[in-house]
Structures are given as structure tokens and as C-alpha cells.
């Protein structure tokens, strides 16, 4: 619910200030997490507007310029720059998920899943995002 309200707030502020578009700094990892968590919540129809570049349902252009970079690639790059950019990167500490925990959210599960998958199988993360983009293209025809 918070992510929906945040998105609406950003969109309203962009419209109010006459912006022609919104740039989000979401990585491939974050977009993959969002894709699977929205699908699990039964909101699969909104995935194209939440993960793809283009016109949003609110008539403002949305762009994800870092969509082809994994979270670990961004972290490595920010540490190598001079001066380091690491203070500008929010470290999303994934909570430890206990299998029997009733308070674990879908977002927490997806974050933990992609944190582990990204280490050894980064192509899986990219395939999730690529597949959701293909669904958008198929849906617009």
C-alpha cells in the first residue's frame, strides 16, 4: 500500500510542477522483486506500468535508466568511483525471514529470494524483468 501511495505522490508532484517525465533509480533486481511480488498479490495487470519505460496510466512518461544493472553491479560501481558514491546508495537490509513467520511480507520474501539468486544466477533476475517487458509488448498489440 505504501508503494502505491508513494507512486501516486510522486506522479502528482511531477504533474503539479509541469514535469514531462519521472526517472526512477530501480535496478533490474528491484524490478524483478516488484514483478513477482505484484504477481503474487494478484496485481499482474499493473506490472507493465510498474516496471517498463513509457507512458504511465497517469499520462506522464516513466523511465527506469538503471533497469539493465543488477543491484550488486551498482554497489560495486559506486564503491570504485572517486569520490565514492556509496553514501548516496540506500542499503536495503533484507530482514532475516523465518519460514514459519506470519509477519513476513511478500516484498521481504522476494527481496531475500533475489538477493540469493543474484549472487550465483544473475541471468534469472534479468529474465524476470525481460519477460515482464515482453508481456507489455504483447498486451499492447
Image (spheres, rainbow, N blue to C red):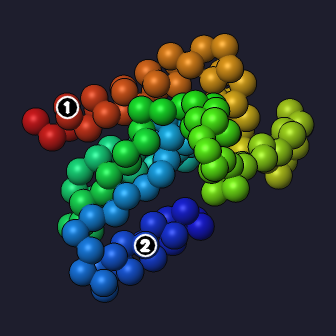
Neighbor class of circle 1 (other Cα within 10 Å; few <14, some 14-19, many 20+) is few
Q: Residue 92: x percent and y percent? A: 72, 49
Residue 5 numbered mark, or none: none
Residue placed at 73% from the left, 35% from the top? 112
Say which of 30 and 106 sits in front. Answer: 30
Looking at the image, is mark 2 or mark 1 earlier in the sequence?
2
Left or right placement of residue 77 versus residue 116 in this view:
left
Cα distance in 3D space between marks 2 and 1: 28 Å
Q: Residue 59: x percent and y percent? A: 21, 67
Q: Quadrant of the C terminus?
A: top left
In terms of secondary structure, where does tag 2 sit?
Answer: helix
In the rendered view, tell whether residue 48 sits above or below residue 10: above
In terms of secondary structure, where does tag 1 sit?
Answer: helix
Q: Nearer the viewer, mark 2 or mark 1?
A: 2
Residue placed at 82% from the left, 52% from the top? 103
In the rendered view, tell whether residue 78 sits above or below residue 119: below
Q: Which residue is mark 1?
A: 138
Say which of 119 and 42 sits in front. Answer: 119
- Residue 101: quadrant of the picture: top right
Say which of 24 and 103 sits in front. Answer: 24
Q: Residue furthest bottom?
A: 16
Q: Which residue is mark 2?
A: 10
Amino acid at each position: 500500500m505504501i508503494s502505491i501511495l508513494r507512486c501516486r505522490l510522486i506522479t502528482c508532484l511531477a504533474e503539479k510542477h509541469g514535469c514531462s517525465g519521472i526517472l526512477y533509480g530501480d535496478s533490474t533486481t528491484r524490478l524483478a522483486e516488484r514483478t513477482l511480488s505484484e504477481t503474487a498479490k494478484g496485481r499482474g495487470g499493473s506490472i507493465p506500468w510498474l516496471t517498463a519505460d513509457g507512458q504511465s496510466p497517469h499520462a506522464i512518461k516513466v523511465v527506469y535508466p538503471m533497469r539493465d544493472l543488477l543491484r550488486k553491479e551498482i554497489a560495486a560501481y559506486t564503491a570504485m568511483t572517486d569520490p565514492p558514491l556509496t553514501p548516496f546508495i540506500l542499503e536495503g537490509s533484507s530482514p532475516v525471514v523465518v519460514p514459519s513467520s506470519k509477519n513476513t511480507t511478500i516484498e521481504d520474501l522476494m527481496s531475500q529470494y533475489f538477493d540469493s539468486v543474484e549472487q550465483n544466477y544473475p541471468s534469472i533476475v534479468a529474465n524476470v524483468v525481460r519477460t515482464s517487458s515482453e508481456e507489455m509488448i504483447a498486451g499492447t498489440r
